[in-house]
Amino acid sequence: MKWSWRVGKIAGIDLKIHLTFVFILIWYGLSTYLGGGSLTAALTNVLLILALFFSVVLHEFGHALTARLFGISTRDITLLPIGGIARLESMPEDPKEELLVSIAGPAVNAVIAGGLFTGLLLSGFFNPPLVMAEMLNNFWLQLMVANITLVLFNLVPAFPMDGGRVLRSILALFMDHLKATRIASYIGRGLAVVMGIAGFFVNPWLILTAAFVWFGAGAEAQAAELKVGLKGLVVRDAMVSQFYQVEANQSLSDVFQLAMSTGQENIPVVSNGNFLGIIRRADLMKAIDRLGNRAPAYAAIGAEPAGLDLETPLDEVLPKFAAHRALPVLDGRQLIGLVTSESIQQRMWLNQRMRDGSNKPRTGESTDIA
């Protein structure tokens, strides 16, 4: 994700922080101080935000480590002002496994809230007489309430919150995955409409949340439709076998001219017939700015995706497009083709037309395909 930087690795998973998260910390501290609060109050509020986002990190690791039990890896976890995002390679297809992965995050926050409540109870915090002002300003009570809020918010039955996946996994126990996703998506969008209307009367932030839920629900339904459309297809079915490539020692100027004249955005680089990598347009422009247009082509190769096998199912390939626009198909070290999001869409469109044609043959026409 752009504007994010890696701050460490935990359990083999990269932890990143988005730049806007830092701005939130600064804004929250300054707004408290400039609003008449003391420096101590401002620092306390910043510490509360940090503690809350530490809870968010634990929430995301709950998802990630539970997914790992089912053989699903996590690319990274990124902290954003709206919370955290754990980028899993995929979600389990088994509804029971998806239920466990989805519920693991809120369960972590529930455990944190329970631990804080126990600590406050044992410390005598809830013993009478109770002073409301002291309770509202207590750091640990605020953190407990924040974790309870995270549990309740994430269990709202709407994508992309955990509750939407929980609902979908429960429905999928009684029907197929696509139908369960559609129903969960409809429910999510219905809740988004309610949130949006309530936002005009209660809190404008609900309007933003409603938009987030509306588009998240639509994206989840679209992804499910796409997965069904890819069922039974393998890399061979969507591979582009005619493309342009360059030798490793050709200049970046040659690569630029080739990209401009052909419109091909991803240019493979080879050396003596062996595949080295792919130059993306953004990497090409950065390399020219940094090294000049006479530098060799291999200097512009960016982060490289692993090569695909011809018989790899396309639904397993799809998550890789989150990081790469074009994926190489290799035979040993030789490049034999490329798979792009466009080639997959075209293959799906062709399959749909073929299915429609076989189901509804026109009078006087043969449905045989040579």
Image (spheres, rainbow, N blue to C red):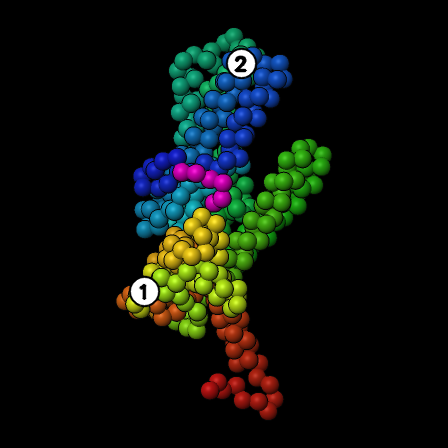
Does residue 102 appear in this view? yes
Q: Nearer the viewer, residue 365 or 31?
A: 31
Q: Nearer the viewer, residue 159 or 335?
A: 335
Please report whichever mark, 1 or 2, sits nearer to the chain's N-terminal start: 2
Q: Kindly identify the amino acid type of the residue bearing the numbered disc 1.
A: Ser
Q: Is residue 3 magenta?
A: yes
Q: Where does label 2 land, which residue? A: 39
Residue 37, x across and y down, in percent: 59, 14
Rendered view: 362 above or below 83:
below
Q: Kindly identify the amino acid type of the residue bearing the numbered disc 2.
A: Leu
The residue drawn where x is 50% and y is 74% is: 351
Instruction: State the extent of the magenta-drawn residues as a range.
Output: 1-6
Residue 16, x across and y down, in percent: 42, 38
Q: Nearer the viewer, residue 345 or 149?
A: 345
The residue drawn where x is 52% and y is 78% is: 354
Residue 298, x across and y down, in percent: 37, 57
Does residue 98 appear in this view? no
Separation of marks 1 and 2 at Cα, in angstroms: 61 Å
Residue that extends furthest to the top in the rendered view of this protein: 129
Tell me the SS state at disc 2.
Answer: helix
Comparing labels 1 and 2, the label whose residue is closer to the camera: 1
Q: Is residue 206 magenta?
A: no
Residue that extends furthest to the right in the rendered view of this protein: 201
Query: What number of labels is visible?
Result: 2
Q: Are marks 1 and 2 in contact (CB under 8 Å)?
A: no
The residue drawn where x is 54% and y is 30% is: 23
Label placed on residue 271? 1
Pointer 1 local density, CA inside 10 Å: few below 14, some 14–19, many at least 20 = some
Pointer 2 local density, CA inside 10 Å: few below 14, some 14–19, many at least 20 = some
Tell me the SS state at disc 1.
Answer: strand
The residue drawn where x is 62% and y is 43% is: 210
